[in-house]
Image: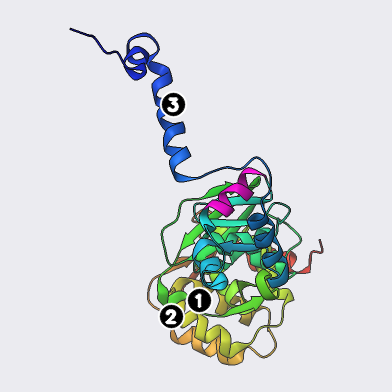
Amino acid sequence: MKLFITFDCLLIHYKPHLLGFIYKQKVMSRSTYISENLTQNHLDFIRFLDDEEVDIFSLKEIEKLTKGKVKNLNEVIENLVHKKVLSRIERGKYCRSNFRDELVIGCRLANDGIVSYWTALNKHGLTEQFSNTIFIQTTKVKAGKIVFGVKYQFVKIASSKRAGIINEGYGNHRYQITDIEKTIVDCFDLPQYSGGYAELIRAFNQTKLNAEKMIDYCNAIHNIAATKRMGYLAELLDKKGMKSFVRFAQNQINLKYNLFDPKSGENGEFVNDWRLRLNISKEEILDICNKQY
């Protein structure tokens, strides 16, 4: 009787920790072939990206764009990632190895992503303070992540809050961002993403706002407390062209008192006309507006 002992059996007995590694290598070798050098197929794909001016893409997008003309597309992309010609942003999403536009990347990380809140405030020139985090609105739940050393935070919103979206950039570098009015309204809606209430008050004061857009966006967010705060500010600052917005905000007033700054303590003067408690006084608000960077 002959006894046959396979190589795998010996590994299991003597070096079991190596078996997983060898199995992984076998699976990889079956799924993707990594060549030692760039092949003609790889060079043709790079030339295609050059011709189409594509710096960032998803696998689905590039499959549609190439229309099946690239053989073994997955294998080509994996080879170019391995050779550091391309970088993987996340599963199924890639960019050129030297592409680092953080706003474009942020919007690509979420399929319906919109640059918003503090990041949009800075992009619109409404604050000189810059966050180390890029804020992206999305209607999907998505965990924050770090890509190429940049931290991204994804803020889930209801689809009804998707409004005031404009496009920036061009071609393959295009991305979505909230316009000035929607950025202001969003920051009052969720001030924890605005970079601080003083910065938000200063931004509200220094920029020209369209009253009709403000009304539309306040209806979209459906946050009465935030609407009252903006209405009170517009009236206090006698903001030009905002009378219709002030009237709209007054019509939203309910019986409940809200703190002017939702993140500060419960103190300060009560303003009956607006059902607000000024835990930041009128004098402090005006001082914030007059203070330069």
Q: Residue at x 45, y 45 (%)?
A: 31
Q: Is residue 236 left or right of residue 260?
A: right
Query: In the structure shown, which secondary structural element does the residue marked by tag 3 occupy?
Result: helix
At which x and y percent is residue 21?
45, 26
Q: Which residue is mark 3?
A: 22
At which x and y percent is residue 101?
70, 60
Query: Real-space Cα distance between discs 3 and 2?
Result: 68 Å
**Amino acid on which the number 2 mark rests in the picture:** Ile
Q: Is residue 77 above or below residue 53?
A: above
Count neighbours of disc 2 (C-alpha within 10 A) and say few if under 14, some if 14 to 19, many if 20 or more: some
Query: Real-space Cα distance between discs 1 and 2?
Result: 7 Å
Q: Which residue is mark 2?
A: 253
**Amino acid on which the number 3 mark rests in the picture:** Ile
Are the residues at dot 1 and dot 2 in contact (C-beta closer than 8 Å)? yes
Query: In the structure shown, which secondary structural element does the residue marked by tag 1 occupy?
Result: helix
Queried whether the magenta region covers residue 79, the answer comes back as yes
Give the mark nearer the N terminus: 3 vs 2: 3
Q: Residue at x 73, y 53 (%)?
A: 98
Residue stretch rendered in magenta on the structure: 75-83
Q: Which residue is mark 1?
A: 228
Query: Real-space Cα distance between discs 1 and 3?
Result: 65 Å
Quarter occupied by residue 109: bottom right
Give the mark nearer the N terminus: 1 vs 2: 1
At which x and y percent is residue 19?
39, 22
**Amino acid on which the number 1 mark rests in the picture:** Lys
